[in-house]
Amino acid sequence: MRPVTVKTVISAPREEIFDLIADLSHRVAWTDHYTDDHRLARVHPVGLGAAIRFRVKPPLQPRVYVELSIVKADRPRRIVEEARVGRIGRTRLQAVYDLIDEGGSTRVEMTTWTEPGIRFDAFKESLGVRRWLRRNTRTALARLRMVFEEPPAAPLARVTIAGHEPAKNPRFGAAPR
């Protein structure tokens, strides 16, 4: 699929925006309109190596799982994410967030593209996935802007790991009690 680029301007320092985008546990706060069933893949959800799994509902397709991880994080300029989408993770997806400082505000550009694994996956993508992706990422960036410009009264939604208790993590190689 050809790249889909969506842009917005947020009145906040780019370091703060970078920190929120790089924290995958908060991703549900601004993308839950087209994603659901979020699960963290690693205990540490921030920065390079962080990973999350969720489902999306593209047009004319059943719910599809996406396994996304951050592969490059150049604070505060760029975040590169790679994902495996669909059946057996055949389709490769890449998303790049570019954060450009514009004085007192930040321009956020998100570019997304896919590489279908087989021809049938490419055919399914031709059924409107590009338009669907553009519309939903535009809405997601507008919701991200609202997080900074009109902060919600309640804390942001957050994904955690079920049963994980950080106080019981092994320290300095010691076995858990």
Image (spheres, rainbow, N blue to C red):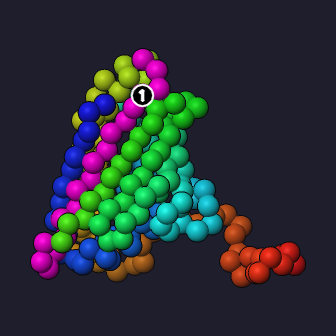
Image-quadrant location for residue 41? bottom right
Residue at the (23%, 62%) spot, across then down? 108
- The residue at 54%/35% (across/down) is 89
Q: Give the left or right position of residue 136, taking residue 67 as reference.
A: left
* Residue 3 vertical placement versus 162 (above, below): above
- Percent position (x, y) of residue 160? 58, 66
Whether residue 92 is situated above or below residue 103 in the rendered picture: above
Visible in this render: residue 37?
no
Closer-to-camera residue (122/136) = 122
Which residue of the protein is positioned furthest toward the left in this rendering?
103
Horizontal arrangement in the rendering, residue 54 relative to residue 72 (left or right): right
Q: Please report the residue visible at 67 percent of the width from the left and 64 percent of the height from the top.
A: 162
Pick the residue in front: 149 or 8. Answer: 8
* Magenta-span inclusion, residue 73: no
Q: Which residues are magenta?
A: 102-119
Task: State the residue at coordinates (47%, 55%).
Answer: 71
What amino acid type is highlighted by mark number 1?
A: Pro
Give the quadrant of the C terminus. bottom right
Q: Which residue is mark 1?
A: 116
Against 176, residue 93 (above or below) is above
Name the main secondary structure of what is drawn in magenta: strand
Q: Callout 1: helix, strand or loop?
A: loop
Residue 7 seen anywhere in this rendered image of the structure: yes
Q: Quadrant of the N terminus?
A: top left
Residue 67, given in percent of the width and then of the height, sits at: 53, 46
Front residue of this view, candidates 94 and 40:
94
Instruction: Pick the residue in front: 21 or 155.
Output: 21
